[in-house]
Image: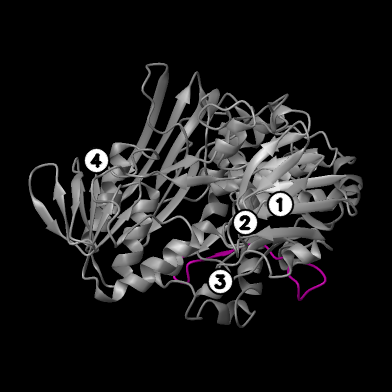
Amino acid sequence: MRYAIIGSSAAGISAVEAIRSKDKKSDITVISDEKKPLYSRCLISYLLAGTIDKDKIWIRPDDFFKKNKAEAILGVRAEKIDLKNREVYLKNKEKVKFNKLLIATGSSPKIDDVPGNDKKGVFPLRTLAHAVQIQAALDKVKSVAVLGGGLIGLRAAYALRSRGKDVSIFVRSPQILSQIIDEESAGIMQRHIEKKGIKIFTGRYAREIKGKLSVEGLALDNGSDVDCQLVVVGKGVSPNIEIAKEAGLETNWGIVVDSSLRAGSKDVFAAGDVVEGHDIALEENTINAIWPVACEQGRIAGLNMSGEDQVYDGTLAMNSIEFFGLSVISIGITKPKKAIYKEIVKKDLSNNKYKKIVLRDDVIVGAIFVNAIENIGVIGALIKNKVNVKDIKDIALENYFDYGRIIKIIKDSKDGFREKEFRETILTL
Amino acid sequence: MKKIYCDIKKCLGCGSCEIACAVEHSRSKALYMAIKEDKLPIKRRKAQFINKSVAISTGCHHCEDAPCVAACMSAAMYKDKKTGQTMHDVDKCVGCWMCVMSCPFGALTRERQEKVIVKCDLCPDRDMPACVEACHTGALFFGVLKEFKENSCDTR
């Protein structure tokens, strides 16, 4: 048996470990276009902020591939998949043969088509190389403009503010974090960040990045100009589906997979940011390009590649954000647009506290907790298992709400809460 | 693996497990001194009420497919391959709270000054975890599942 894995971040690494837990002998080849891939993408903004040293970004030891008896082809891009002959063509003209293939090609930063984005001093923030490049460019920089108020944009802004730079964020939407949380919680976070010295301009975007060779400023949509010497573009990511699409696999926004994480072929799997799969809360296909999903999918794809028969229940959007001591966690649907959804909100704005759950027919489908994030995982379990919460919905946002309050629901649930750890807690109830 | 189980029939929700846990994880390991330490020790166990008169003491369940391990973006949370325990390397923790987000039991606690997580470590310096030893009613049990079932589940 020969396994090939394209990609060596969260999904690829998890898959190697899962395969090796079941199959000690077969050949595994991992292909990555990065020379040193075993770092956490989520940590690069921490590195840029100076919160952690470079030696802390590695999530597996240097000898990871050797220890797992995997061949690593690093710094080489996989260019084509030949499904008929079961080969991956590499940029260096070599080929990798496979019996089972995992596509974990991840995603790339969306390119902002603003004129002037080719100037020196314009960066995305996705890879370790980006963080190192930004760091190297910082010396002569006084002011930074961040384009985009999503997670990456805010993380970049936070990092560069921590480095003492004058930072302004330009957000096209009327609110920050518009893909993740609702307007009210975003407002709490925005005011908090602004108090710490980051300027945020919502409903504003750059018409042009100005300068000769290097960035000198922005021309904004309202006609005003802004001085800056560095621009970070944080406009989200798009999945790297090209290689799968050209091979004839089903792609839409991402690579379409079934509940075994197969991509339309018995021996081809996909995992991580590149996957478009069933979303438990939305009940439709979507991409949730987040770290926990990539690890879980990598693990399950790896197990299934090695002959197991594991079912992946689907993804759930979830994000945890903390800036300057204010933490926000969101899960599932947070900005419902249809009338079938009901919301329960509890807030204490003078203490920056805000909690909301979103329900559909007495089933929780989403939650936002601001500055009081304890036990949101319990709500997450209710979302994942789609149970009726009629009996507890009125106390779900209380401070005393915890796992104890859902034990009866677990006991009464027939097909949910399958993990044995849940069952163990109700043995004596 | 050996874990801590709670017999709901016996648990009063008295909180003795919480105090014992906090003291065990203090610098002095003695209650009268622990409460005077600069940084108050943090409990990893919680006595939780199912309703007014029924309670359960919970903490980390050391899940086999631990969601906190999958969610941890800095590889601070990991499974010990030999013991099956869910371990936490405080030096790698960056306080992103992704584990808080993903733990269905609410078993992870934030240490907000240091920006790290604290969790049940099954008291590595002891034969019997402090919470189990402190439980006055015998509700808490340290052992393998089979023993717990024989001890608690068949007697009702």
Q: Chain of mark 2?
A: A
Query: Total of numbered circles in the picture?
Result: 4
Q: Chain of mark 4?
A: A
Q: Around disc 4, counting alpha carbons within 10 Å, would you say few (fewer than 14), some (14 to 19), or many (20 or more)?
A: some
Q: Is B41 contained in the magenta span? A: no
- Regarding residue B96, the answer to whether it shows in the image is no
The residues bearing labels 3 and 1 have C-alpha atoms spaced at a distance of 33 Å
Label 3: element kind: helix
Q: Are marks 2 and 1 in contact (CB under 8 Å)?
A: yes
Q: Are marks 3 and 1 on the same chain?
A: yes
Expressed as whole percent of the image width and height from the top left, the position of residue B84 reads: 80, 58
- Regarding residue A169, the answer to whether it shows in the image is yes
The residues bearing labels 4 and 2 have C-alpha atoms spaced at a distance of 36 Å
Residue annotated with mark 2: A76
**Residue that appears at 28% across and 51% down:** A117
Expressed as whole percent of the image width and height from the top left, the position of residue A89 reads: 68, 45
Q: Is B120 contained in the magenta span? A: yes
Give the label, 4 or 2, closer to the camera. Answer: 2
The label on residue A172 is 4
Image side of residue B8 versus residue A179, left or right: right
The residues bearing labels 4 and 1 have C-alpha atoms spaced at a distance of 44 Å
Coloration of the structure image: one colour
